[in-house]
Amino acid sequence: MGNSVIVTGTAEFLFEEREVLRTHIVLVEVRHLALPTGIRSFRLPDGRQTPTDVPVLLVRLTDTDGVHGYALLWAQQAQQLRLVEACLGYLAHDVTQYSLSEIPRLTKALSVATAFLGGQGALAFGVSGITMALEDLVCRRRDTSLSAAIGRRRERIRAYQTGLMLHASIEELIAEADQIYRRGMRAVKMLVGKPTLDEDVDRVQAVRQALPADAVLMVDALQRWTVPEAICASQRFADFGLTWIEDPIAQDDTSGYRLLAQESPIPVATGETVFAAVDFDALLAGGIHYIVGEPERIGGLCAWADVAGAVHQAGGTMLPHLYPHVSAQLGATLRQDETWIEYVPWFEPLVAEPLIPDGDGFFAVNASAGSGFTPDLDAVDALARGSWHRLND
């Protein structure tokens, strides 16, 4: 896959219809929002407490005809998005120098602009935020959905809902799993990583036994374990029929993942904090089957699709991380047979067109123009933590 996923073949395909893309970006804006999760705060592996709201940064690009393109960036802390906003401001000048028909040149300019400071971290979020908003805008100008522009292969997409947090009691876990199932979802991902493995085993067993036989269960350890702990946990969980165990160890422990892939009786999923394509390559080479990719880290939506294509060629399965409305569009284009998107309800109050499960655990793939994310502007006003802030001169 190489070292960069910013300039991609999929992106060139999306932007090739030049006759409708003669306009320039004249306005780059951001707005800070807070999305209520309804989840009590819990402690992350780094010792920090999670917020009860998810801080997000809404990016809006406007072209010379007044057409908007949107992207949403999320973080664990609002202060982190201040850094991302600074990066977006640094890159905003480049965005206005090219027409929409010159996107490959713009993506090259963004790559050059990040070379000195490095293309990962906050700058990667900045590049991805601009790119995702551009991709949304181009789809709107072409009056097509992202999945149709890339190549739609399915009309509905299977989803799992993430929930069942560490702070919940076993009784609360069972009640939440039942509520998710009754809503029409047929797959649930729960968090593990309690102080003792026995606690985790009891909790997973209780949820597995409470869910109907047709329900799928996954677990996410949030990188909490050492390699020996992860191997032991996977062996203890082996009888529960888990589809995968996600982020069991530190994301950058490539050798540890290689060993875990060999020893775990349960398939392993990881990758959501990866920035560079070379690191996805290393995970695939180490035997990791489920590769989790986050568009805000790896260069945007077309870049994600290109990584997914490489994962498929290597025999792996690509999984989107969060962003369910956009993920449905991406998932609809996948060549792989097994497809999943991650659903959390936090984003629903913000969108104009909510996702509604069909009772079999699938969502219909929206055919509306754009990337899949269309904000409800009244909801934006209600959830905003400030006004729109212009970034370009």
Image (cartoon, rainbow, N blue to C red):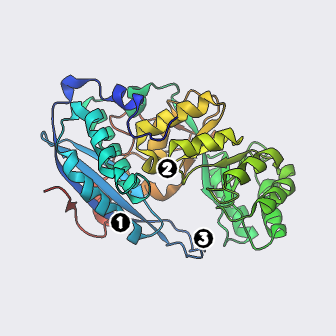
- Residue 113 location, x and y as percent? 29, 50
- Residue 23 location, x and y as percent? 15, 35
Q: Is residue 11 above or below residue 130?
A: above
Amino acid type shown at disc 2: Phe
Q: In the rendered structure, are the residues bearing label 2 and label 1 in contact, judged by CB atoms less than 8 Å apart?
A: no
Mark 3 secondary-structure assignment: loop
Which residue is tagged 3? 44
User: From mark 3 to mark 2, how far is it between C-alphas?
Assistant: 21 Å
Q: Earlier in the sequence, mark 3 or mark 2?
A: 3
Q: Is residue 273 above or below residue 144?
A: below
User: Horizontal placement of 40 versus 315: left or right?
Assistant: left
Residue 275 badge: 2
How many marks overall? 3
- Residue placed most toward the observer, 266 or 9: 9
- Residue 253 location, x and y as percent? 66, 56
Which residue is tagged 1? 83
- Residue placed most toward the observer, 188 or 91: 91
Q: Is residue 154 above or below residue 114?
A: above
Choose top left, top right, bottom left or bottom right for residue 326: top left
Amino acid type shown at disc 3: Leu
Residue 351 badge: none
Choose top left, top right, bottom left or bottom right for residue 249: bottom right
Amino acid type shown at disc 1: Leu
- Which numbered mark, 3 or 1, is in the foreground of this view? 1
